[in-house]
Every structure is written in C-alpha cells, then in structure tokens.
C-alpha cells in the first residue's frame, strides 16, 4: 500500500469505531443519503456475533493478511530453495520477512514480503514495489501437515524452468496481484491504475474477504438497524424492503426439500426464481473478465463480468473441468443447479465449511436408505468409493497441492470416456484399469441400460474435431432450452465454422433468448454480418438490459458505415461504444484492453487513436506480438507498407518462431508482389503451425497464384486430412482442379463438400458457381 492508502485505511477504521460507539452518527451521517458506503466488518459484529465467529476462522477472513509472526506459515529461518539454477533464500531481519531471489533483471536481490496470500493448502507471498505493484512470488509454502507431504517450499511451475525473461516469472505482469488477484481477495477493491505513470494506488475497505464483499456496503443497513424504533414510521420503503442492503440473501428462507419415496431424491418446496446468491459467489468463483469497475454485490453477474464458456483450454468436451474454473462454470451445468440448489445449501456461507461431514451434505437431499448403501455404490463402507463426492465430484489438483472438486456433480461416464477420451471418476481412482473395464463394471452393477445416454459433450467433441455433420448437431444443442445455458452458448460460438441456413437461423433466434449468456454468444457468432443485417439483428441489442450484451453489440455495430445511420441511431451506437471503451479501460493496465479499444476505433476509421492504442499496448508489454501485428495492419490500411514491414521485422526479433508474424509478413509481401519472400514467409508460418488450417489454406492459394498448382493441391489435401470439414480448403481444391481441367477430381471433392453442406445445391451448380 502507498502512504496515502495507508492513511485512508486508518481513517476508515476510525469511522468504523465511531459507527459502533456512537450509533447516532450513523443516522445523522447518512440521513437522506441514497448511496451506501463501506463501513467495515467491525460495524457488523455487534448484531452478528455468531456469524463473525464463524467467519474469523474461514479462508475468506484469511484470504490476505499483513505478513507477521502470526500470519506467516512458512519457514523463514534462512531456508534455501533451488529452482532453475537459482538459489532463493528465505530469512527474517528486524522482525520482517524477506526473500533473496532473482528479480526482473535476473540478479539476486532482497525483497520484503509485505503480505500473505491464502492459507491452506498453500500460502503465497506478495512483494510490494514503489510503483504500487504487488507481485505474487512463484515459490509457495505447502501448508499441509508434514505427513501429507507438506511443510515445505515448492515452486508453482515445477516443470517450466522459468527464468526472469518468462511471462510467468513472479516479477512479470502475469503474476501481478493488482490485476490478477486483488478484487477477489479483498473487500471493495479499487485498483486505481494511473496510465500516465504506469503505477497503482490500489486501495480497499478491508484487506480480506469480509462481510461487505458479499453483502455490499452496509452504511444504510446500519441506519436501518439503529432506527428500529422509528422504522415503522419511516417512509423509506426501499430501506425497509432490503434492510438497507443492496440485496437480500434470502433465497433459502422458508424453503424445504421434500423427499420423493420412489426416487429417493428431493425437490424444492418453492421454485427458485432468482440467482442472487450464486451470482454473488460467481465473481470470485469463476473464470471471467471484468467489464465494470463499480461492481456492487447483488448486481447481475453479466453487468460486471464476462464468464468463460466451455472452451477447449478450460474444459473437456463433456464439461468436466480441465484447468482451474473456480466452480461456477461447472456448477451451472449441474442438475443440482437446475433443481434450485444454491451454494449455501451445501456450504455454510460464513465458515465456508460443508453443512454436514462426509456424505451427510448430500444426504440432505438424497435418501440415505437408497444412496448410502453398497447396493448403490458397490464399494466397502467408509472407503473412497463409498464417498458421494469422490464419485460424483472427482478432484483435480491445481497449484501442485490444491485438490478441487468438480462441481458439475455428474454420474461417472466411462462410456463417454470411450467415445470422447474424457476422464471419469472410476478410472481416476482405478488408474490400473481401462475405461472399457469401468464401463463393463457399471453394466454389471446397474444393467445394460445404466447410461443416461446422449450428452452434449458428444456434439462439442465432434465440433472440436471438425467432424462432418457437427454443424447440425451444434445447432440442435444451441436451440435446446433444456440443456445448460453455458453448453448452448458454447455450441453457438462454434456454429460459424459450420455455415448453413439452419446455423444462421439458430444464431439469429438466439439473439432473443431469455438467457443473457446465450444472447452474448449469438452476438459473437454473428460477428461477420454485413451492415444491413447488423442494423436489423444486432442494433436492437444495444439497449439490452445486460451490460455484457450491450457492449458486445456495440463492438459489432462500430463497423456500420455512418452514412447508413439516422441521427438517433448514431447517438445510440456512440453511447454504446463509449460504454464498450469504458469497459475495456477497467483493465487499462493490460495491453489486451488497448488492442480491443484500437480495433473498435479502427472500425470507426479513427486511425490516429488506433495508433495510440496499439502503441500504448506495446508500452505496457514490449513483447506484445498481437499489438505489433495490429499496428502493422493499421499501417497497411494507410498504405505505409514500409512502416508495417519494419514493425513486423521488429516482432520477428522478439519472437522468431511466431507463426502469426511470419503469416502477416507473407501477406504484406503478397500485396507488394514480392512472391519469393511471400512464399518463404507463408511457408514458415505453415511449418510453425501445421495444424492451423487457415495459414495452410492461404499458403496454398499463394502457391497456386505463383503457378505451383500441384503443390497447392497437395497441401489442400493434407489440410482436409486434418480438418475434414474445412469449407475454404474444399472450395479452393475444387477450383484448382477445375482450373487444371481435371473435372473428375473437381467433381469428386464437390461431392464430398455437398455431403457436409447440401445447401450448396448440386455438383453442377457448385462447379458453375466456382
């Protein structure tokens, strides 16, 4: 913290004490106020003592702390740790904690540990720099008991051999607390990034995750509490309605779960009509990007964040978690979520502990006499196989020691493992067995019809592997309201790779879907509409009630020529674009934000502003290849190919093995009719990314233009072996054969294309069109 922030925190603490000791000041200070203020958890203790006791021992309370003898769990008794040829030493000096390790320039230096970060099963340590940055050290403390392998220093990237030049090195931007971690480990976090000085004055109401992180600013709630005697005479109905809080976490109030004796499952006594509780947890328990710096607990998730979908990086095709997903993306796939289960049905929200131990938490809603028996789980009592969570919520270990349960809460599916190469709980335990063995065992236990049948993962798997016909299945998934919205949204974003009238119709209709995640994905899928279609289909979403949807619509509408718009339409679009840019500036400390701003400004032909945005991105990250490629493309548009070539060659010096740069250079040389250089660059791009069908396709077209049609045809055939549904490669191949007069081969591949896209008509029509 900077000195000014420390003073601010001291003043906040003083105000808290006054609020507690002199209740009258609360009413006087906020009389007539319509905006609540953060007052700190100390203001909550008087009325909520038991909840405070539960919270004090929770991971939320211990999420971040000042480093001292009570909070630091690690051994700083001159302990040494070796990693990638660097010996780091952890020591104490004058009751302060230090590490001697390699910094941003690679030299060994002493750094003071200012804060602890987390508590169990690992604890990280934060180092503060004069410009307000806090950086998370890559060496962490394993805080598990020694008998479990803990009580040791270890590196979070043991297999990476990171040097100070690597993006994941602790001193670099990707390990920056202010951007990466701060808002979820503190309360009322204000990043306060100064773009002019590239510095931070980050502040918070409380250092950890305290009461107001979930319940919102509480000054009006205290006013409500201290005016109980007057409240019945109050005309402030909103204050009375929510007790002065942004939202009431009462979705479980007067709710019971009733068992069905036939199924052994239970149902909610009242249908859950809101997602307030889940959306309060989701900002910190999801993979997402921030689009609003003024988040208030209780406001809609997509007004503040854009959650990640079931991407290949994060999830297996059936939605099982692969990389860290922080729970939300898994849970909203689950049957539990769709039956109305909330986070606090299973977790006590203040202690964060389960409502009951072991299987007890599941037996709240699932009959013990049916599910907690060997006739159901077929394992020895008290074994891991008899644990509900081990079978239905298998763990994956992250950060070396942190085992986290998959909250999609699913039936183990070894049958899907056979089809999709996905993991299953059976084989995660029985690693010496095969999925076929697990599948047969399930059949032996539960009968031949044990499997629930088709799963949306089968369609996502088809699409990821570019199977012919995947487009129709994707359209069916996208259009099915019974499937999880996150799966439908994922299918929609994959649909453009399978263009057809059906796909277009599904994407178009999805723009009006009641689920905002589906609407958002439909916008992204329709990114390439022409201007009249954008006005017809995208323009109405500029006034969508959800911010994430509005700003995505704004990004797309920016490219519509101004002369096609009425004055009113220009005003609405400009306002929406301003909102989009404002959302990007939330992350003004990241180069990606400036690239995004530049791209929107490019759509508006504001070339000077575009250049400034790209240069700002490069200033923030001197190794930003994307910023340089975009800057080169800007110079191309301005017919300054000499400057574009210079920028791309600079990028090659930074990343000589970057296929994107070679591809961009190749296109530049093609435009300048320098075909020898063009083919060299395009060939290099293809060699560096042989699985990138677009790069291979462009190289093939260039080969054909250079008279090397046979080589182009051979390359296109190779592409289609790897990407059997690549329409561009099919069309190019048919065209090249037709160009050679080889009508039989052109017809052969036209037939294959029409199997995938019958909407193209007959072979004769296709050949004529080409």
Image (spheres, rainbow, N blue to C red):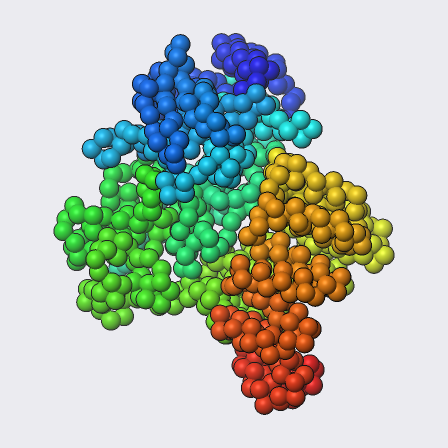
In the image, 408: left or right of 21? Answer: left
Q: Of all residues shown, which one is farthest toward the left? A: 380
Q: Of all residues shown, which one is farthest toward the front? A: 676
Among the 4 quarters of the image, the one containing residue 160: top left
Q: Position of residue 106 (x, y in %)?
A: 49, 30
What quarter of the picture does the C terminus occupy?
A: bottom right
Identified at 85% across, 56% down, the residue is 563
Location of residue 591 with respect to 734 vertically, above or below: above
Location of residue 585 with respect to 190 vertically, above or below: below
Of 524 and 497, the residue lying toward us: 497
Identified at 44% across, 39% down, the residue is 162
Location of residue 397 with respect to 309 vertically, above or below: above
Q: Position of residue 46 (x, y in %)?
A: 43, 17
Q: How many marks?
A: 0
Of 210 and 527, the residue lying toward us: 527
Identified at 35% across, 67% down, the residue is 419
Of 169 and 143, the residue lying toward us: 169
In the image, 709: left or right of 204? Answer: right
Q: Position of residue 294 (x, y in %)?
A: 61, 33
What quarter of the picture does the N terminus occupy?
A: top right
Location of residue 143 with respect to 651 vertically, above or below: above
Of 713 and 564, the residue lying toward us: 713
Q: Position of residue 500 (x, y in %)?
A: 60, 73
Identified at 67% across, 76% down, the residue is 707
């Amino acid at each position: 913290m900077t000195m000014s922030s420390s003073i601010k925190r001291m003043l906040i603490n003083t105000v808290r004490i006054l609020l507690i000791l002199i209740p009258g000041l609360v009413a006087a200070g906020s009389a007539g106020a319509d905006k609540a203020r953060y007052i700190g958890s100390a203001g909550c203790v008087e009325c909520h003592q038991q909840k405070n006791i539960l919270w004090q021992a929770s991971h939320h309370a211990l999420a971040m702390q000042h480093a001292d003898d009570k909070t630091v769990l690690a051994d700083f008794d001159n302990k040494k740790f070796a990693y990638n040829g660097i010996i780091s030493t952890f020591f104490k000096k004058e009751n302060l904690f230090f590490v001697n390790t390699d910094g941003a320039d690679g030299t060994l230096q002493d750094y003071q540990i200012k804060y602890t970060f987390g508590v169990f099963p690992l604890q990280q340590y934060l180092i503060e720099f004069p410009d307000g940055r806090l950086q998370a050290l890559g060496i962490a403390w394993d805080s598990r008991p020694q008998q479990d392998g803990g009580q040791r220093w270890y590196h979070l990237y043991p297999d990476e051999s990171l040097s100070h030049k690597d993006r994941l090195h602790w001193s670099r931007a990707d390990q920056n607390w202010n951007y990466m971690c701060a808002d979820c480990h503190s309360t009322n976090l204000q990043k306060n990034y100064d773009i002019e000085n590239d510095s931070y004055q980050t502040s918070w109401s409380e250092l950890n995750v305290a009461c107001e992180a979930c319940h919102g600013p509480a000054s009006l709630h205290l006013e409500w509490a201290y005016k109980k005697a007057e409240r019945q005479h109050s005309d402030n109905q909103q204050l009375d309605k929510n007790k002065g809080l942004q939202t009431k976490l009462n979705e479980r109030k007067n709710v019971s779960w009733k068992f069905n004796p036939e199924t052994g499952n239970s149902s909610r006594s009242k249908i859950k009509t809101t997602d307030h509780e889940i959306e309060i947890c989701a900002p910190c328990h999801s993979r997402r990007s921030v689009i609003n710096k003024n988040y208030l607990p209780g406001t809609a998730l997509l007004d503040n964040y854009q959650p990640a979908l079931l991407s290949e990086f994060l999830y297996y095709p059936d939605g099982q978690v692969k990389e860290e997903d922080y729970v939300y993306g898994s849970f909203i796939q689950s049957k539990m979520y769709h039956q109305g289960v909330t986070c606090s049905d299973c977790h006590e929200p203040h202690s964060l502990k389960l409502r009951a131990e072991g299987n007890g938490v599941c037996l709240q809603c699932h009959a013990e006499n049916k599910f907690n028996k060997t006739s159901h789980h077929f394992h020895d009592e008290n074994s891991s196989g008899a644990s509900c969570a081990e079978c239905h919520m298998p763990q994956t270990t992250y950060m070396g020691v942190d085992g986290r349960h998959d909250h999609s809460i699913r039936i183990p599916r070894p049958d899907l493992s056979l089809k999709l190469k996905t993991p299953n709980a059976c084989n995660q335990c029985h690693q010496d067995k095969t999925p076929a063995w697990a599948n047969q065992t399930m059949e032996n236990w539960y009968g031949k019809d044990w499997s629930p049948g088709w799963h949306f993962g089968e369609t996502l798997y088809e699409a990821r592997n570019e199977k012919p016909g995947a487009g129709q299945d994707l359209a069916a998934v996208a259009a099915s309201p019974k499937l999880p919205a996150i799966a439908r949204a994922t299918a929609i974003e994959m649909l453009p790779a399978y263009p057809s009238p059906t796909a277009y119709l599904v994407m178009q209709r999805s723009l009006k879907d009641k689920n905002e995640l589906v609407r958002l994905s439909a916008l992204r899928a329709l990114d390439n509409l022409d201007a009249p279609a954008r006005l017809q289909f995208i323009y109405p979403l500029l006034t969508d009630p959800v911010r994430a949807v509005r700003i995505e619509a704004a990004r797309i509408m920016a490219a519509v020529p101004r002369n096609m718009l009425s004055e009113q339409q220009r005003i609405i679009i400009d306002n929406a674009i301003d909102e989009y840019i404002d959302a990007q500036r939330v992350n003004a400390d990241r180069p990606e934000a400036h690239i995004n701003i530049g791209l929107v400004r490019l759509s508006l032909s504001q070339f000077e502003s575009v250049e400034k945005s790209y240069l700002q991105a490069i200033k923030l990250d001197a190794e930003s290849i994307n910023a340089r490629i975009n800057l080169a493309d800007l110079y191309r548009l301005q017919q300054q190919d000499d400057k574009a070539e210079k920028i791309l060659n600079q990028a090659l010096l930074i990343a000589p093995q970057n296929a994107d740069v070679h591809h961009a250079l190749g296109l530049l040389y093609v435009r300048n009719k320098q075909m020898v250089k063009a083919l060299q660059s395009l060939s290099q791009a293809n060699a560096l990314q042989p699985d990138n069908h677009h790069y291979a396709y462009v190289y093939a077209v260039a080969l054909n233009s250079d008279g090397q049609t046979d080589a182009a045809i051979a390359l296109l055939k190779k592409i289609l072996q790897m990407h059997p549904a690549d329409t561009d490669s099919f069309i190019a191949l048919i065209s090249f054969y037709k160009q050679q007069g080889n009508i039989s081969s052109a017809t052969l591949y036209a037939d294959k294309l029409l199997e995938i896209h019958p909407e193209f008509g007959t072979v004769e029509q296709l050949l004529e069109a080409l």
